Image (cartoon, rainbow, N blue to C red):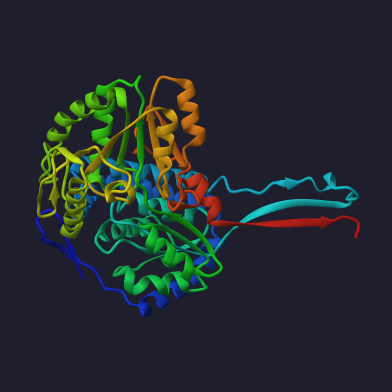
Amino acid sequence: MSVINPFDQSVIDTVPRGSSADVYAAISSAVRGASVMAKLPAHRRYTILKRAADLMAEKADDLAETITREEGKVIAEGRAEVQRAIQTITLSAEESKRLHGETVPLDAAPGIVSQFGFTIRVPVGVVAAIAPFNFPLNLVCHKVGPALAGGNAVILKPAGDTPLSALKLTEILLEAGLPEEAIQTVTGSGGEMGDAITGDPRVRKITFTGSMEVGDRICRNAGIKKVTMELGSNSPLIIMSDADIEKVAAATVASGFSNAGQVCISTQRVFAARAIYADLLDALVRPTQEFNAGNPFDEDVKMGPMIRQADAERVESWIAEAVGQGARVIAGGDREGTLHTATVIADALPDMLISREELFGPAIAVSAFEDIDDAIAKANDSRFGLSAGIFTQNVDWAMRFAQEVHSGNLHINASPQWRADVMPYGGLKDSGMGKEGPAYAIDEMTELKMVVFHLGA
């Protein structure tokens, strides 16, 4: 199947269109690989992953260009993703040396005096990693890195639109010394192969990033196995009356439109205190108009195309629906093919699609609130809960935000689109369950076994 450049629709390359038979063969190989990995010492796993990170650094330019060609983000963002991916693999390497159990004070229970207990942590076996298109290298690394660090084998299913970065990572891992059957990368349609991957009982852990609807199907099909679900969002940003409007406008634009808005934690719903609402709208217009869309390899372009024309058309239709229900477009709103301009929508209402669902495109919906209670209620009026932000100098407002907003990631004086690869990352409600971040993911990709010595028996 063809891999298409979303900017000019040229064919970059072709990859195999995998079938359920290919999946079965790959899992069979991964089962053998899991036995090899379980016997691999922690220091050897560290050495392999650290070598992979070094090779990624050597190949950084090629990896960045591959990301931009197949995904469409501007080359500066492609380069930044490569550097983050190197850190993710490096962090995973370090975590391979930190897996440990602990002693359990069994004598803390009444009547127990002759037992000594401790835990040990072991690999789950085969991990299925199903990755999205929008970060085709770093989000793959967030799944593959901790899985290998924990001593597992991996079945990797990259997004059908962006498989090339994952294939290059696979080659790098093998070049770094990873046992051949420790990673199996299958390319093709998720709709055709997904059930075969997730429903196979030999897969003991699934880590998935994508839409809530697909995540729900995976969980229903998975059966008894561990799952991590990183799903959708429509992240809110609260702007209190004491915020610096110019700084807020710059942060809002950067977090709403980078990667053409195709980020799980993009700023989508902006709630401004009524006293500063008009001033904020004015401040958003110029930086939004300057966030130009075009050829992602042009260093002067700030935003590339959306991944598919159908997605750009969907964004266009949601904006039209909002306007039809009384909202105003104050900047942007145009589309040409896969290129959609950065767009600000004023006077958004909570029942509009652009407020209720995940847009995953370059538009933000702005509305006013009356007080902190109203702001928190509006932020929580969503089935999603992945990331949220607030701008304020008031500590009481900031603490109420942290305690009362239903989100897995909470940012004070920053936009919701902020992530360090070292931190625990995951959502609440329909945004999923489980955590990424190598130190946290590795726990979910291993099992804890309890050992009890009965002394004197």
Percent x, y of residue 294: 10, 45
Residue 439 or residue 51, whichever sits in front: 439
Q: Residue at x 57, y 45 (%)?
A: 98
Residue 42: percent from the left, percent from the top? 55, 52
- Give the image location of residue 411, x and y in percent: 41, 33
Nearer to the camera, 17 or 363: 363
Q: Quadrant of the N terminus?
A: bottom left
Q: Is 405 left, or right, of 343 in this rendering?
A: right
Q: Which sits in the foreground, 225 or 346? A: 346
Left or right side of 233 for 72? left
The structure residue drawn at horizontal position 42% and vertical position 59%, both measured from the top left corner, is 178
Q: Residue at x 34, y 42 (%)?
A: 84
Q: Is residue 343 visible?
A: no
Q: Quadrant of the C terminus?
A: bottom right
Residue 193 in sight: yes
368 or 307, nearer to the observer = 368
Figure label count:
0
